[in-house]
Every structure is written in C-alpha cells, then in structure tokens.
Image (cartoon, rainbow, N blue to C red):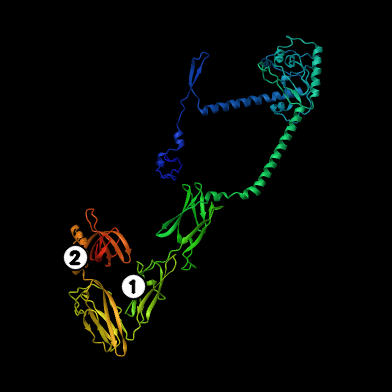
Amino acid sequence: MKCPNCGHWNKESFPRCFKCGAELSSASACQDWKQQMQGRKTTQTVIEYDAHGQPIETKQAPSLAEEMNELKARRAQGMAVLSSAKPRYAAREREAMNGMPQRTSAAEAARLDFAVEEVDPEEETPAPMDADVIYSKRSRDLFMGGNEDELVRPRRVPKPSARSAGVNARVAKPPQKGVASVSVEASARARAGSAERPRSASTERQRAAAHQSMLRQSRNEYDYTPLIDMDIPPQESDTRAITIMPTRAMSVRGARNAAAWILRALIAIAVLAIGFVVFRKYVQPNLPAKQEETHSEYIISEATVQGLPGRTILIPGEEGDKIIIRELAHTYTVIGGYATVTVADYMLYETEGITPEEESVHVELLPSLNGNTPLAPIVLDIPIPMSKIVILQPRSVWTQVSTAVGAIQLEVQQGSRVLVGGQDVSDTMNDSGVLTVSQPVQPIGDNIIDIYVTSPHQRTNHQTVTFYRAPVEISLELREDSGTRAYVSNKKVSTPPVTEGEKKEDYFLISASTMPGATITVETPHKNLDATNLNTTGAFTFMPVFDALGDNKIIIRASYPGKADTVLEHTVYYVPTATEYSRTAWALAPTDYAELLGNISRRIGQVYQCQGEITQIISESPQIAIMNTGKNGTVQNVMLENKSGEVWVQGQSYKVFADVSGMYDTMPRMYGRYTYK
C-alpha cells in the first residue's frame, strides 16, 4: 500500500507507514487490481472516410482479444498456403536440376503477366536467364527448405522453351566479373514477349555463350542458380542498380579490417591491464581509506541511561546501512543519516582490577559496516564514578566522645557492599540505602574507623571516621542508650516514670558509670541526681536542665584519690515539645515581615510560623533552603536551616515553625524546628 504522505510502499496489513508513521487507509478499502480491471470495456470507435474526406462508416473498434484471434487465424492460413506450395516448388527445383523444361500453368502465367507458348523441341540454344531472378544458392535453399550441402556444384542452365523465352530474356548484357547489375527497365521491356522484339538464333547463341562464360568466371566465388517460377511480381518502379554480392577483393579488404580491429582491441586491453597494475601498486596505497573519510566523524555526547551516566554515539552512513559493534554485541541501523548508539558507561569497562586511584579508563570500539567493512575505531575516555558515601552520623569525621560505643550512620547506593571496621555490614541496609553501625571506642585517644563502600560498576570509596576519647585514669562513660536529642518541656521536667500513664517525653534522663568509690560532679544545670549505687557498681543517673534551644553541653567530672580527674562532655540537641514551641510562634504577615527586617537583632530566638513554597535548596548537609512566605504573587523570602526530621523537597509547600538566628543578605535566617505538610 502506498503511503499518501511520503510515497513509501507498505504491506497492506500495516496500519501506519513504516517510514514516516502516517496513518494508512484500511486494507479492506483497497480493491485488488484484478477486480478493478474486471468488467472494463473499451469505448473506442473506428470511422472510415472516402476520398473526399467524408465519413462513410462508423463501427466499434475491436478488442485486443479479437485482434489477436484474427492475427492467429491469418498466420494459420498463411502456414497452410506455404505447406501446400512447398511440394510443387520442390518438384520444379528437381526438374530444373535435371535440365527439364519448366512447366507453367495458365493461372500462374496470368499472375506473372506473360503468354504461354508451345515448346519447340528443335530449339537447342538456351536463352540466358534474367539477372534480376538470379539468387544465391544459399538463399534459394533456405527459402525452399532444402539442405545447404545438397547443391554445391554449379547448376546446369535448362534449355529454354518458346513459352519461357519471354520470361528468361530479361538480361540487357552479361555482368562483369564479380558484379551483377540489373536493369529493371530492360526487364519490363522483355516481359512483352518475343512478338514485340524478335530475336534471331545467332543472337540467342551469342548471348547464351556470354552467359555461360560469366557463370564459369564466377563459379569459384558465388554459385548463382535460377529462381524457379516464383510467384513474385517484378518491381517496375525501382530503376536503381542493385549490387548483389561483394567481390574477392572486397573479401580480402574485409579480412584486413577485421585483423586491424582485433589488433586494436588487444592493444587497448594491454594498456588497461598495465594501468590497473600501476594504480594498484603505486596510486591506491597512497589514497586514504574510503570508510575513514565517510565514517570518521562521530558525534559523541553524554547521556543518562536508566539513571546512570552513559554516552550517545552518532555514526554517519547511508540510509539503511547496518552498523555492527561486536564489543556491544548489537547491530544498529542508519536512520536519517546516522546510526544512534546509546550505551551506559558501565557497559564499556570492567571494574575488576581497577584501583580506586584510576579515575578513568580508555575504551576503543571497533564498528563495521554490514559486518565485513571495518570503520574507524571509536576512542573514548570513560570516567569511572566513585561509590556514594554520605555520613549522616557523626556530623564530623573527627568527633570527641565520652561513651564506650560510637554510632555511625551511612547512606549508600542500594546494592553496595559496605565494610565498617573490617566487618561486612551490607545486610543491615534498609530499602533507602541507610544503615547504622555501632563501633567500640577505647579511651586511647583517636579511634580510627575505616569505611569501604563498593557500588556496582563504580570505584571503591574509602573514608574514615575518628572517635576521640581521651586517655583517662578514672573510667567515666555514658550508657549506649544515652540520647542526643531532647524534646521535653523545660517548665515541666518530671522524675523517671513510676506509672504506665506517664510519658517519656516529659523528661530526659542521663545514665552513666565510673570507678566504684569515685566522686561524681555534674557541672551543668541538672536535677534529681541518683548516686545510690556509686560505691558498689559506680552507676548513677540525673536529669539535665536545658537553658537554650538547640545544642546544650553536659559536663560530668569524676574524682578519685591519687588519680587525675576525668571530665566527660556530652552534647544534647534540645527543643521544647511541639505544643509548647508552636504556642509562642508569631505570624509572618507582610507587616510582621517588615517589622522583623527592621528589628532583626531584637527578634533573635523568637518563634515564627513560616508557610510557603521551597523555591531553592542551597545545601543538603545541613539542609538549607529558601522559602517564599509571600501570598498573591508577593516575594517574602526567608532562609531556613532544617533541624526537623522531615526532608524538604524543592517545589513543595510546607508549614515550618522556626526561631530567628540572624540575617543573611536581605532575608531573615531561621532554624526550622518542626515541619508540617
């Protein structure tokens, strides 16, 4: 089916064009060409005109089938006539070969337009035959259906009769050697018969002798035989001389010309062969390869393949060519002048044997045209990405701790292999790629923890986390479950719960241990110190009192006679409960925003309710963003540092309760403590 848009021929079953994608008409709507031609009739007519240009008859033109049938019938009729005439012509030929007089019927004489006379048996002088009825033996034999080898000797001239004298007396003069000229005008005069121009016996004998001499001279060159009473009327209108056969000189000259042509052909073939050898040996090696001129300009650009870095390679070529890249085990078709190869970087190299210091790898692809014509190689320098490691906890790679256990929280790519402190902890990873590992911390100073992460198709990433715990003479450490974030009310700090109905958020308890018999001093605000088991097990507890939002430092000192004191510092992020914190929040209307900008130093620590869209993410760790709190198209930006557990997304709208920490450029800077969608 031909596409009406681009002209491309498609299968009838295709709903759309294979080349341009245009919609095709239904296959059922296309009738078969035989059905379209079936029943069609011609409407042509034939008009015959008379000599004056007036129409005399109008009839319908015959169809092609009728014309073919008429031609077949005429051909069969002609074959039948030739078949019936052939035996008669063969019998007359045999009579002519045996020297018998020819017999011509009255009907044949009437067609040939001459009179039939009685045969004079005493007439012995043969009359020469007319030259315009002399044909070569080969032409006569082929026409009569005879064998070319039957009549190879010169023919005897039959004795002419009186009735055939009018036909045979047409030669004006005997032809010269090698050339036979015919005068049609003399032949026409001879047809009138002997009554018109009577001839004597001596004249007839002279002409017969001349004719026999001519036959003997030309016997070795051409064999002339009489045409036996053929039903072919003479052409009286043609008066030009006719050359029947070439002479021997002409044959020799033709042979020389043929030899000259053969010699020229051999010389031309030799010149072409020498030129081909010179081209292959001296010229072709110096020419650049054709495929390099056509396919050396590749277009290479970066791409993202299934979320991973990759490459897009455009290979130029002729429309429909097949480009095979064996390294990728794939075949690409040239469409629109280029074959498009899109491949991820990791498919072009193997990570095995690549050290973490190797930042890139050299790759060479060898494309070929249709699998048999090599193209110019594709050379690429592929950077090998580093495996992802995000240390969520601790916030610094060097951290001073006072506990016997340090917590490490990492975010890596899903499916990575993670080694922390020489142990494989990959199985502790959740669906988001986050895992938490606890490592023992000794009071020896720096405790270096090695972290190795190897993600698929990436280099191994190596980082370290150092926990510093000062060497001490008196042991002093917090319990592993001691929290680092406190969401409690400063106005209502209760004792540890003694009933099931009391909430844990109402208090924040610190549990620690030291050398039995040591003296414990809490140097920061606190209450409810319990040292009951201090002399036996060295364990004690207390509840800190936080005097500022955010990070609050807790300091504990242990003393023992004869030993140096041990000081332990622990930082806790404190924020009041959401109910207590949001209760003190101010609105951020346009008038409030203008007042905040004018009195920023007096509003530090004040809580505001910020509601709007996150227009820009400035930093991810810690997460810092800009929110537009304006309404109805007004711009009212504030900078927020995320201190809540919710992760902000650019373009999303949130309601954030935040307290003022200062000024950044022309906008207030705040700490976002609680986030609501």
Q: What residue type is labelled 1?
A: Pro
- The residue closer to the viewer here, 140 or 339, is 339
Apparent side of residue 500 relative to residue 619 in the rendered image (left or right): left
Q: What residue type is labelled 2?
A: Ala
- The residue closer to the viewer here, 599 or 313, is 599
- How far is mark 2 from mark 1, CA to CA? 31 Å
Q: Which disc, if any, is residue 394?
A: 1
Q: Circles 2 and 1: CB distance less than 8 Å?
A: no
Q: Which disc, if any, is residue 585?
A: 2
> Element type at marker 1?
loop
Circle 2 crowding by C-alpha within 10 Å: few under 14, some 14–19, many from 20: some
Furthest toward the bottom, the residue is: 562
Q: Does the rendering let one see residue 478?
A: no
Residue 307, picture quadrant: bottom left
Q: Residue at x 28, y 83 (%)?
A: 557
Q: Quadrant of the C terminus?
A: bottom left
Q: Which disc, if any, is residue 153?
A: none
Total marks placed: 2
